[in-house]
Amino acid sequence: MTVIYGINNCDTVKKALKWLNQNNVDHTFYDFKKQQLTPELLTSFVEKSDWANLLNKRSTTFRNLPAEIKDNLTEENMFKAVMEQPTLLKRPLLAINGQLHLGFKDASYQELFDNA
């Protein structure tokens, strides 16, 4: 099962969803604005990728974090911050075949689903 995680109003998520629909890829969309991020789900993300890749450090949400969190990016601090504000995660997150792929690029998705 292919699951795409993100928020509906994110332009990159919109592009990824459009690509999946146009290419008839059966998928489920998990919208962090409508469905709660659970500790178990976040743990599974961290197990498949590390914090350096998962965090969207260019986001407004990240820039607005208190300095004591941004200056102390421990796993514990980031876990708590992301649980409170899932928009700290890069988007979209695509779960397929037990792997997690971050972001969207047409060519990357084409390659992923050609090999799926």
Image (cartoon, helix red, strand yellow):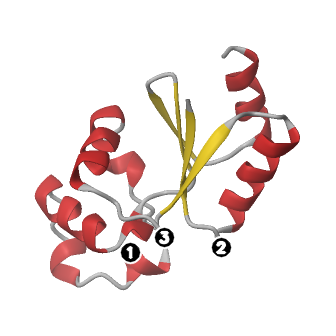
Query: Which circle, 1 or 2, is nearer the viewer?
Result: 2
Say whether residue 45 is left or right of residue 70.
Answer: right
Using the image, tell me which numbered label, if any, was put on residue 34. Answer: 3
What kind of residue is marked 3?
Lys
Disc 1 versus disc 2: distance between alpha carbons? 18 Å
| Residue indicated by mark 2 | 9
Q: Earlier in the sequence, mark 1 or mark 2?
A: 2
Say whether residue 17 is left or right of residue 48.
Answer: right
From this viewpoint, which residue is outermost toward the top? 115
Q: Position of residue 78 (x, y in %)?
A: 22, 62
Q: Position of residue 84 (x, y in %)?
A: 27, 73
Disc 3 versus disc 1: distance between alpha carbons? 21 Å
In the rendered view, would you say 9 is above or below 48?
below
Residue toward you, 14 or 35 = 35
Secondary structure at badge 1 equals: helix
What kind of residue is marked 2?
Asn
In the rendered view, would you say 99 is above or below 34?
above
Q: Position of residue 33 (x, y in %)?
A: 48, 72
Using the image, tell me which numbered label, if any, was put on residue 102. Answer: none
Secondary structure at badge 3 equals: loop
In the rendered view, would you say 36 is above or below 101?
below
Query: Which circle, 3 or 2, is nearer the viewer?
Result: 3
Q: Residues within 10 Å of mark 3 (few under 14, many from 20)?
A: few
What kind of residue is marked 1?
Phe
| Residue indicated by mark 1 | 62
Residue at image position (44%, 24%) is 98
Residue toward you, 85 or 51 = 85
Q: Earlier in the sequence, mark 3 or mark 1?
A: 3
Residue at image position (40%, 80%) is 63
